[in-house]
Amino acid sequence: MTNFDYALWIPLLPFLSFLILGLSANKIKARAAGLTGVLSLVLATALSLLLAWSYFGAHGGGHEQAYAALQPLKWVWLRFTDTLPFEMGILLDPLSVMMLVVVTLVSLMVHIYSLGYMKGERGFARYYAFLSLFTFAMLGLVLANNIFQTYFFWELVGVSSFLLIGFYYDRPSAVAAAKKAFIVTRFADLGFLIGILILSYYAGTFDFAQLNAPDGPVLSKDWAPVFGGHSLMFWALLLIFMGAAGKSAMFPLHIWLPDAMEGPTPVSALIHAATMVVAGVYLVARLFPVYELVDYGAALQVVAWVGAISALLAAIMAMVQMDIKRVLAYSTMSQIGYMMLALGVSDGGADALGYTASLFHLFTHAFFKSLLFLGAGMIIHALHTNDLREMGNLRKHLPWTHWTFLIACLAISGIPPFSGFFSKDEILAAARENHFWIFAIGYFVAGLTAFYMFRLYFTIFWGRERQYSHKPHEGGWNMKLPLAFLALITLVAGFIPFGEFVSADGLPHHSALDWKLAGSSIGIALIGILAAMYLYSEYKQLPSQIARSLGPLYRLVERKFYIDDIYAFVAKRIMIDTIGAGVAWFDRHIVDGTMNLIGRTTLRLSSAIKGVQSGQVQHYALAFLGGALALAVFFFFRS
Amino acid sequence: MIEGVSIQEIMAVSVILFFIGVYGFLTRRNLISILISLDLLLNAVALNMAAINRYLHPDNFQGHFFAVFIIAVAAAEVAVAIAIIVDLYRLIHSVDVEEVDKLKY
């Protein structure tokens, strides 16, 4: 058995970097700050790759036995009761080791890229401190061995996301976006917390291993229905999924993600594309046995439908956005919808294909989506605008960006041999076995994805040459290198036999491509690409004509299905203007009124009798004498 | 026990002395006069104590002790009061009690 104690250093290194940078943010030179951040991540990445190598290599390959879940470190942090201690620990199983690799690799790329992208920005050291803090929190989250630790780091990633979205704190829109992201995810986390409390109260443990064990306290019991025909555990899982949906920007809690694009672009690549937003998928995957078996997977049905609806709505909204980062944000939401959908459709049968497919897609998506974001960052860096209407014909100016962006677009559209093809195909295969409509939505969204991604691609890199205030040029090596590296991973990641490593039951799982299905999904992707090419590869009036002819439908999509407006309506009109106004009236008139009455009465009374305190000693003496005489008389005549 | 003097006579002197003190305390303006009135009060009480002890409980000494004690306290009180009055005079150049009314509402 290999010793995995060094796993502790993987989250600890970024934390050290955060401490160093956070404590000396004002004194340290920008260059030193960047190097500290990058160095800590280089070491952490090296360690996690080593760990993944020795963990997966321990079996020597070809073994038909489950990968062991190891807990190299575990200690009790807080002891609530004797039976329910709050532990901190490290759990290594295929899922967490895979996430470890994804998080450290993408984070390293973003750290390197930011050296160029954030160069000369005010608060450079602060930026790296937050980035390190986020990486620490995310690594702690994926390594958590119990659900309370997950929650702990879950909030920590929320905070660092908040800090990084609001990095440009002198911009009101960034501040508003940061607040929105924080409030929406906090609201979802409230559900998560209640879910944890219900689950752990009845299970008597926080530990994932015990929660997931087939003979453990959750799965060995029959839970009686309590409410709505479902058991308590079902509702707990639904509440936990609410937290997951908030973090992963699933409908209807997705509204914060597009606004979160106010943060620096590398941050979007790291947090809002590759790592934090997939935490929800990770959480459901982590509790997968529970989701699968409690109430015969009723909660998974919800997960599947939420995923499918999110995938569809986000893909539709991505088609009309004019901000490059917002298109990518909706695309992220749509792809995470895919992952949720895949988790939702994998109930036991067919070797739980969806589980593997979902995590495979998480893996490939992390790389190609962060590649897309970093490419977008390159464009924004060159042009100083996010607006698609001010871009065009950039392929001559930004060749590196062009090629890597194209690779990522092909990958997300599901064109072989790029990585997205393999994972998306597995998802569709899993969905087809489960539910026709979910499959149909997934299939349709695949076409939409190809369309909106290539709309983006053709608008930016082809089309009309624009008047640029200065000739666009690419960043230095520190920005090109991450692009090239991520593009390389995107090229080869599809050939990783992912099912061999990560599967629902831990056993190696061999998946074979179903070429009939693959062919049809390539077909719809090609249709999407060709449609985008026809419409956007050179400047035409046609797209805007189509938009006009669709009229109200187009407006509906452009206004994001009025979901933001509904929230604003609920929050402002109902919560603030109606309920809030009533409560405020009660507070102002009844509560304050009572207090004011007491105060005013006291004031009046005291001003009426205050003349007694005249300051004249002799008056007091007279009163004293009078009192003494009165008492004397009283006692004299009383007896 | 003093020959030919009854306790009632001594008590009458004591009461007269006391009410002279009360009258002076309430009507005088000058703080020094008020202080003197105050001492009249104390002395009235001390006289009372001594007389009652002597006439009613000749075997005990508490009354005498109290009288002596009152004299001691009066001495101390006069010292403190005079000091306050001197300071007050330095402050407002007056020893008129009606002008010392800072501590009112």
Image: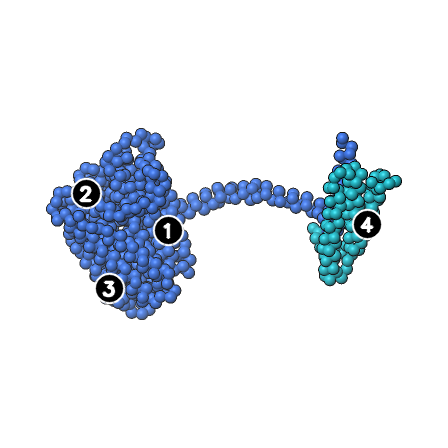
Chain colours: A blue, B cyan
| Residues tagged by mark 2 and mark 4 found on one chain of the structure | no
Q: Which residue is mark 3?
A: A480
Q: Secondary structure at mark 3?
A: helix
**Would residue B53 appear left or right of A281 to someone viewing this image?**
right
Q: Can you tell which quarter of the image residue A632 is in?
A: top right
Q: Which residue is mark 2?
A: A506
**Foreground: A506 or A8?**
A8
Image x and y of residue A610, in percent: 70, 47
The amino acid marked with disc number 1 is: Ala
The chain carrying label 2 is A
Q: Which residue is mark 4?
A: B24
Does label 2 or label 3 sit earlier along the sequence?
A: 3
Q: Secondary structure at mark 2?
A: loop
| Residues tagged by mark 2 and mark 3 found on one chain of the structure | yes
**Foreground: B86 or A304?**
B86
Q: CA distance from mark 3 to mark 4?
A: 104 Å
| Residues tagged by mark 1 and mark 2 found on one chain of the structure | yes
Image position of A214 with respect to A279: above or below: above
